[in-house]
Amino acid sequence: MSKYASWTHGKLPLPELLELKRRGQKLAMVTAYDFPSGRIADEAGVELVLVGDSAAMVVLGHDSTVPATMDELLMLTAAVTRGAKRPLVIADMPFGSFQVSDDEAVVNAVRFVKEAGADAVKLEGAGPTLSRVQAIVGAGVPVMGHVGLTPQSATMLGGFKAQGRTAAKAERLYADALALEAAGCFAIVLEAVPAAIAARVTEALQVPTIGIGAGAGCDGQVLVWHDLLGLYEGKAPRFVKRYADLADQAKRALEDYVADVRQGRFPEEQHTYAIPDEELEAFEGWLAAQHGVQADHQ
Ligand code: KIV
């Protein structure tokens, strides 16, 4: 029997996520930032692809997600949606794109759908974010919520550290997640939250939770592409599981290439284009005549 109730071909229908949660089927989400990563994620069978504002760090080299801009995220999202045809593609709304007003949040969310082909957007936080979620969902754009460690407000949270580790903070987090569901979110990311709290939140919600550093009790998991594949040099958080060491493989391949170029081992005949003998002969004749003309003029 298929894992899915209604997904046989084409784009994953959004309501299928609720059905998967109901059936206890886990969801796999990964970030992607360009056409090939979108295509590979699609071929690997993930249900959800997030064009995270983590791009600011892992792709653009900033030391936080805060500098990510609408223009950058729009460009990356458009590339991902050209590659990821079957999974739902969620664009992360960068810092500053939804904080000012509900109206501005709607305008920017709509841009992700119209200009970049996103299926949904993700917003960090609760509190003032709740009215943004209602406004965006009201405009017809599905919204994924994100609570716990919300990197855009890491400074206010006291750094990149686990959240909800006291009873009072866990209560706040639980209430925020429920409020985001009530505001219309179709799924909620729980980041760096104690596993026991994430499990309780997951039980309380109708919509799926997607955990990152939130334990196995969530309905799904998400990892950042560069962390999962070993492409990011910085210190990985404890919740990262590295499934490959592509940075090392890429470095070794490039070292081989450099050595081949320097030693004249690349390119070989198979990498070059030929010209028919008679054409080459005619060209050589023409070249010799050119040299003859030049010599006559000296
Ligand atoms: O930007 C991002 O990659 C994220 C995930 C870590 C959930 O928000």
Image (tube, rainbow, N blue to C red):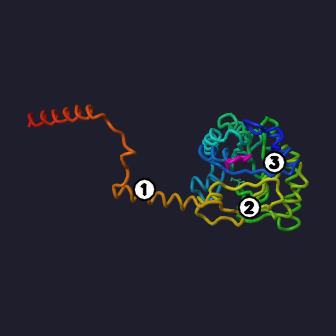
What amino acid type should be assigned to the residue bearing mark 3?
Ala
Number of the front mark, 2 or 3 = 3
The residues tagged by marks 2 and 3 sit, at their Cα atoms, a distance apart of 24 Å
Q: Secondary structure at mark 2?
A: helix
Q: Which mark is residue 246?
A: none
Question: In the rendered image, which quarter is residue 131 located in?
Answer: top right
Q: Position of residue 215 (x, y in %)?
A: 80, 62
Number of the front mark, 3 or 1 = 1
Q: Reply above or below: 50 against 8.
A: below
Task: Report the quarter where the N terminus lies.
Answer: top right
User: To which residue does mark 2 refer?
Assistant: 156
User: To which residue does mark 3 refer?
Assistant: 187
Q: Position of residue 161 (x, y in %)?
A: 73, 65
Number of the front mark, 1 or 2 = 1
User: To which residue does mark 1 refer?
Assistant: 257
Q: Reply above or below: 99 against 159.
A: above
What amino acid type should be assigned to the residue bearing mark 1?
Tyr
Q: Position of residue 264 (x, y in %)?
A: 33, 55
| Badge 3 or badge 1: first in the primary sequence | 3
Question: In the rendered image, which quarter is residue 172 located in?
Answer: bottom right
Whether the residues at callouts 3 and 1 have beta carbons within 8 Å, the answer is no
Q: Residue at x 46, y 57 (%)?
A: 254
Q: Secondary structure at mark 3?
A: strand
- The span shown in magenta is 44-52
In this view, the residue in front, 202 or 179, is: 202
In this view, the residue in front, 279 or 223, is: 279
